[in-house]
Image (cartoon, rainbow, N blue to C red):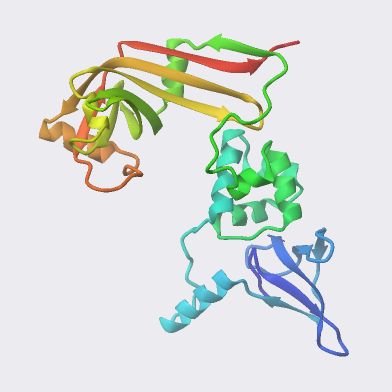
Amino acid sequence: MRAHIGDQLVVESPTTGSTRRDGEIVGLHHEDGTPPYDVRWSDTEQITLVFPGPDAHVQHSEHRLESLRHASRRGSKDTIRRAPDPGDIGRRVALERKRQGLTRTEAARRAGIAPEYLRYLEERSAHPSPATLIRLADALGTGVADLRGGGVDQPPGQGQALRHPVLEDLTAEECRARLSTHGVGRVAVSTPDGPAVVPVNYEVIDDAIVFRTAPGSDAAAAVGADVAFEVDHVDEAMSRGWSVLAVGPAQAVTEPDAMRQLAERAHADPWAGGERELWVSIRPTRLTGRRITPSDR
């Protein structure tokens, strides 16, 4: 008997052959997939160490069966290893875990699940049980709705404010650290139709804030003007957050070598898609920021 994380262990009645109990394999103790297994039983949601008997068999998960079928079509005796393909929940779990600075082992221990199962959730399109989601949300200091993406269309900051918040100024170094290397920020510009604040995917390269846009777009109106660029983060679960404001002149990057280097160093394509050939560079002359933290009271 061999199994993989996410497979089902099915225990059948020795007399009727019908399923007596089943559960998801969430932990392996041997690299070759042989027993014993950590199994989360579907009827109790409890995880136990199981040494399967003759009345048990492994039912491979769908993604595993697909790999086996693909291997069979190619005439290979070896299982083809698929690249990680996390689902929406897995991506959110991984993001929240990293925001909290937790390793998989630490997060799994807090949630009471096997580290192998947490890895499976983060890397595969899985459907954890409601009980597992509750434990994960509690371990990561967030909510089940957030892990499911329920608040994706809601503005941040709807959580409860701290009882005794402290508003602190960030140093220039702290501001630069929070700008980091890339992300999503907002650039404030003047357009023929009036003021506009436009979200853009940005990079920080050689102390300059750079982003790509389309000529004639609202964001392109930044070229040749002094603009404000803002980036922030709100931690709903902890009721705290920060914001950084950069002010400075914006210029178009037109030198071919410089444009090529920017394209090579970009971490991601603009989320908005389409042809965005205009690179805009902002050199901050003023960099300020603030954060909200709890007081010592």
Query: What residue is drawn where x is 65% and y is 26%?
Result: 239
Q: Position of residue 257 (x, y in %)?
A: 13, 34
Residue nearest the viewer, comparing 7 with 285? 285
Residue nearest the viewer, comparing 28 with 258? 258
Query: What residue is drawn where x is 24% and y is 24%?
Result: 222
Residue nearest the viewer, comparing 197 with 163? 197
Q: Position of residue 23 (x, y in %)?
A: 76, 68
- Single out the residue that lies furthest toward the front: 193
Left or right relative to 84: residue 23: right
Q: Quadrant of residue 65?
A: bottom right
Residue nearest the viewer, comparing 292 with 91? 292
Q: Quarter of the image for the C terminus: give it.
A: top right
Q: Position of residue 76 (x, y in %)?
A: 44, 80
- Single out the residue that lies furthest toward the bottom: 16
Left or right relative to 129: residue 287: left
Q: Measured along the vertical axis of the image, is residue 49 above or below residue 52?
A: above
Q: Position of residue 22 (x, y in %)?
A: 78, 72
Instruction: Tally the marks.
Output: 0
Q: Quadrant of residue 185?
A: top left
Query: What residue is drawn where x is 22% and y is 46%?
Result: 275
Q: Quarter of the image for the N terminus: give it.
A: bottom right
- Single out the residue that lies furthest toward the right: 15
Is residue 181 at all visible to an observer of this figure? Answer: no
Q: Quadrant of residue 270?
A: top left
Is residue 26 at all visible to an observer of this figure? Answer: yes
Query: What residue is drawn where x is 85% and y is 84%?
Result: 13
